[in-house]
Amino acid sequence: MIIDDFLEFADAVSVAAAAGTALIGDVIDTSAVHRDLGNGKPVWFVVTVDTEIVAASAGTVKIQLVSDAQAAIAVDGSASVHLDSGTFVTNVAASNDNQLNAGAVMFAAPLPIEGRVYERYLGVLCITATATTTAGKINAFLTYDPPIKSPAYPKAVS
């Protein structure tokens, strides 16, 4: 997978935080790209885990791809949500959801071409609930190449 630095939101950026919503990493100014992201080809939003995301007790975490009119994207719920990872359980390492393990693909989906209109700035929000996450780093980026595993084909039979 090839990653363009200008399409990267986070490169091993910490998501360790108390309960709340935080803007993670950088934002992309869509006025500097074509009006149609991808120019007819699907663009994928991908979040991978660099360092396992854990908490001292059970809590939850989720990631959202959002847009806003300002570069300091609002964390009060007023930003336009385009993609939502769904909720993952954070806990001590042995009890975590598998998507929170180091090296895992936490979330991957193509950017929606319909629905809410994209505002000028595109960014990533991390919503932590119930318990403080004590460790964890993510990578988040846009790419043409979705992170799919190679299919396992059965061995040929002669």
Image: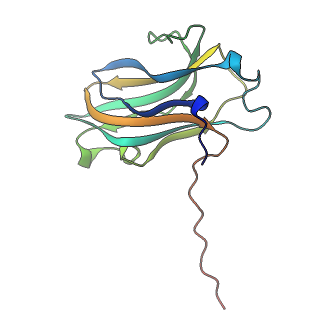
**Is 152 or 43 nearer to us in this picture?**
43
Q: Is residue 54 left or right of residue 123?
A: left
| Residue 111 screen position, x and y as percent | 65, 32
Q: Which residue is located at x 68 percent, y 36 percent?
A: 43
Find residue 31 and report its image quarter.
top right
| Residue 121 screen position, x and y as percent | 60, 15
Q: Is residue 31 left or right of residue 73?
A: right
Q: Quadrant of the C terminus?
A: bottom right
**Is 150 or 10 nearer to us in this picture?**
10
Q: Residue furthest left?
A: 56
Q: Which residue is located at x 32 percent, y 24 percent?
A: 129
**Relative to residue 89, is residue 94 depicted above or below?**
below
Q: Is residue 73 left or right of residue 39?
A: left
Q: Residue furthest right?
A: 40
**Relative to residue 150, is residue 115 depicted above or below?**
above
How is this picture coloured? Answer: rainbow
| Residue 42 screen position, x and y as percent | 72, 38
**Relative to residue 69, is residue 49 depicted above or below?**
below
| Residue 34 screen position, x and y as percent | 76, 23
Q: Which residue is located at x 36 percent, y 47 percent?
A: 102
Q: Is residue 57 left or right of residue 65?
A: left
Residue 124 seen: no
**Relative to residue 9, is residue 44 depicted above or below?**
below
Find residue 18 and report its image quarter.
top left
Q: How many marks?
A: 0
Residue 91 seen: yes
Q: Which residue is located at x 60 percent, y 49 percent?
A: 1
Find residue 54 and report its image quarter.
top left
Q: Residue furthest front?
A: 5
